[in-house]
Amino acid sequence: MDIKLKKEHVKKEQATMDERLNAIRAGVLGSNDGILTVVGVLFSVAAATTNNFAIFIAGLADLMACALSMASGEYASVSSQSDSEKVVVEQERELLKTDFAGQHQSVENFYVDRGVTRATAKSIADELLSKKPLETMLSTKYDITLGHYMNPWSAAWASLFSAAIGGVFPLAALILSPTRYQFIATIAATVVAVGLTGLLSAKMSNGLVKRAMIRNVIIGLLTIAIHYGIGKLF
């Protein structure tokens, strides 16, 4: 009994970690968007006027709008994903009643595709479907853990706060720096901030850290150049 409870606890911990990673992903994306949208607005307005108050209000308004936009977008996206997962659960529950043989065959094929002999795969399918049929189908067909769905609220809050915090970097650099160093300080703050989000995203996805950081820095500098050019035109 203790062993069984321990296994259930491990599965629950794993599912919780997946949910946390989803919130972290939303946070990294929100932070990156917050940095780029705010610095874009700051340079557009700063290129057109030297009024620090006008620049600050424009940057602050964009920061708030970006944070709310990112949060609502994440909430809608993750809610759709969660709803889809719940629909799949009901579909598999019904298929176990109406087409058990087909479901059994699906589990067999799952293990055969991974190098298990057909006879062994059949034995595994027999045992798993006799104990936890719905959990088995969800795991083998969709990689879903029963009872654990992506939380749209955690993703929304993570995106909201990270977008706001990310946008603060260039905004604070521009407003708090001496006038003659405003642009340089803002560019430096943006490079550091987008480099950090590139690092975090690469670490999360086991990607190439250096490439991700360079890519983010280039995108950040292009964002600044484009928006500054637009501000100069008007």
Image (tube, grey):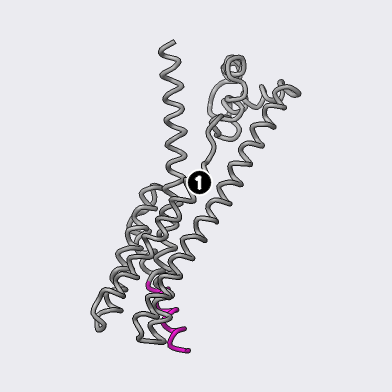
Looking at the image, which residue sits at the far right? Answer: 98
Q: Is residue 144 above or below residue 200?
A: above
Closer to us: 68 or 228: 68
Examine the structure image and report whether residue 232 is included in the region drawn in magenta: yes
Q: Position of residue 111 (x, y in %)?
A: 56, 25
Where is mark 1, residue-wise?
A: 153
Amino acid carrying mark 1 in the image:
Trp
Classify 10 Å Cα crowding around label 1: few (below 14), some (14-19), many (20 and above): some
Q: Position of residue 175 (x, y in %)?
A: 30, 75
Q: Position of residue 80 (x, y in %)?
A: 61, 47
Q: Position of residue 6 (x, y in %)?
A: 41, 19
Closer to us: 45 or 210: 45
Q: Which residues are magenta?
A: 221-234
Residue at 30% x, 79% y is 183
Residue at 42% x, 63% y is 34
Could you tell whether 188 is left or right of 20 in the image?
left
Q: Is residue 107 above or below residue 78?
A: above
Name the quarter where the N terminus is drawn: top left
Looking at the image, which residue sits at the far bottom? Answer: 233
Examine the structure image and report whether residue 199 is included in the region drawn in magenta: no
SS at circle 1: helix
